[in-house]
């Protein structure tokens, strides 16, 4: 008989995390522990990475739903919990961890054996032009050859100047540039802005307009001089039928998968299969999880063998992250099998 409990922890950013939606200094996350009564010393651990303001889940009553999921752990089925995406993500992680020995290896592979590393992009948070240029330089000096820049929150001309400065030193053949607008552009202005962005040979632009405008996004995907990737548009879409309709209507070049926001791992497996049928590429990214959630996403990602840089560097953002065997080494994320977890701050 399985048992499950949960707790909440507040994660503190090393510096203000600025997006087009606002400024974050901290982020709460919920953790679940699952074990078999016959062997209580062995347990699976998962992170229910609720993201207020971005995820489709209601914050009100969240703890009640999480308590229900723990009470029903013996008949937990991911397809029944996709609307509660972060809970599904955490429970899938904890159960997979327990099945694989309760040693924080929910998805074993060459990655968890230390034989393979995952190429990741360097994330450049919003700030002043000077701050963003400094952050970009730090990432490039660390060896990153793919940068993802958050745009849409400061003066657009400053953002163009940042891209110009980077491209003046690093041509497209040396450094891949992605930009993430988080829906900041209006339908009226978006094409004009994308034409200006296209001068800098961008790999892609994530979610240029607000989610939910499928027809407008479809027109944009056809006309945009920069390949468009859907991100927030995937959030809250739980049925296979609706996923197909979105992909056929918008016809994006890429989709960006955040398992904690897109229905969990089984739901993202379905997204990947459907994207392949539609000819769309994809990459996987985290949603500001601690290393508990990031570890699960990275391990799952490693089983997919994608050739694109992934968005898996966010565990480095916190002052009170949970120490783990994950190691960011230059432009790659590695897992050290000999490394240790420090779970003292998780008091269930």
Image (spheres, rainbow, N blue to C red):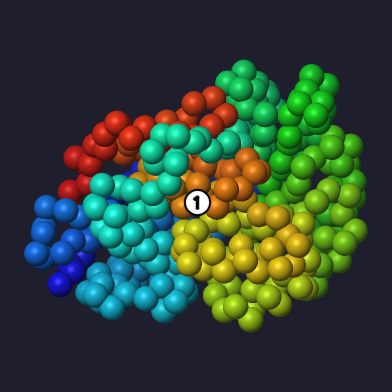
Residue 194 placement, left or right of 82: right
Q: Nearer the viewer, residue 276 or 241?
A: 276
Residue at the image position 63 percent from the left and 81 percent from the top = 241
Residue 9 placement, left or right of 27: left
Q: Nearer the viewer, residue 239 or 16?
A: 239
Which of the 4 image quarters holds residue 169? top right
Q: The N terminus is located in which quarter?
A: bottom left
Residue 300 placement, left or right of 209: left
Q: Residues within 10 Å of mark 1 (few under 14, many from 20)?
A: few
| Residue 126 in view here | no
Q: The C terminus is located in which quarter?
A: bottom left
Residue at the image position 58 percent from the left and 36 percent from the top = 119
Residue 281 location (% of width, % of height): 70, 55
Total residue callouts = 1
Q: Nearer the viewer, residue 83 or 21?
A: 83
Which of the 4 image quarters holds residue 4? bottom left
Residue 224 location (% of width, % of height): 87, 54
| Residue 308 in view here | yes
Residue at the image position 61 percent from the left and 36 percent from the top = 121
Q: Label 1 belongs to which residue?
A: 303
Label 1 secondary element:
loop
Residue 19 location (% of width, % of height): 60, 45
Which of the 4 image quarters holds residue 60? bottom left
Q: Nearer the viewer, residue 241 or 303?
A: 303
Tell me: residue 106, above or below residue 175. below
Residue 249 location (% of width, % of height): 78, 73
Tell me: residue 13, above or below residue 229. above
In this view, the residue farthest toward the bottom is 241
Residue at the image position 10 percent from the left and 65 percent from the top = 37
């Amino acid at each position: 008989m399985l048992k499950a409990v949960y707790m909440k922890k507040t994660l503190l950013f090393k510096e203000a995390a600025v997006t087009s939606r606002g400024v974050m200094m901290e982020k709460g996350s919920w953790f679940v522990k699952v074990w078999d009564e016959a062997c209580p010393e062995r347990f699976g651990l998962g992170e229910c990475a609720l993201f207020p303001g971005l995820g489709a889940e209601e914050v009100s009553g969240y703890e009640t739903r999480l308590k229900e999921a723990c009470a029903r752990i013996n008949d937990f089925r991911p397809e029944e919990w996709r609307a509660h995406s972060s809970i599904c993500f955490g429970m899938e992680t904890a159960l997979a961890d327990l099945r694989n020995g309760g040693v924080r290896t929910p998805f074993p592979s060459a990655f968890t054996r230390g034989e393979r590393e995952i190429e990741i992009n360097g994330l450049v948070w919003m700030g002043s032009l000077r701050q963003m240029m400094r952050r970009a330089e730090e990432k490039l000096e660390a060896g990153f050859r793919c940068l993802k820049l958050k745009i849409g929150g400061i003066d657009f001309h400053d953002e163009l100047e940042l891209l110009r400065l980077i491209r003046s030193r690093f041509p497209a053949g040396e450094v891949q540039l992605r930009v993430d607008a988080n829906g900041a552009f209006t339908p009226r202005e978006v094409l004009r802005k994308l034409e200006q962005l296209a001068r800098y040979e961008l790999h892609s632009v994530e979610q240029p307009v607000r989610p939910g405008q499928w027809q407008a996004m479809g027109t944009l995907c056809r006309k945009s001089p920069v390949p468009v990737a859907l991100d927030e548009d995937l959030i809250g879409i739980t049925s296979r039928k609706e996923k197909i309709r979105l992909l056929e209507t918008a016809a994006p070049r890429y989709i960006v998968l955040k398992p904690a926001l897109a229905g969990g791992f089984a739901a993202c497996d379905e997204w990947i299969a459907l994207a392949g049928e539609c000819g769309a590429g994809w990459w996987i990214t985290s949603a500001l999880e601690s290393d508990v959630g990031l570890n699960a996403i990275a391990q799952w990602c490693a089983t997919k063998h994608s050739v694109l840089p992934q968005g898996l560097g966010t565990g480095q953002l916190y002052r009170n992250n949970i120490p783990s065997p994950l190691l960011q080494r230059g432009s790659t994320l590695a897992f050290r099998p000999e490394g240790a977890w420090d779970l003292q701050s998780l008091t269930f």
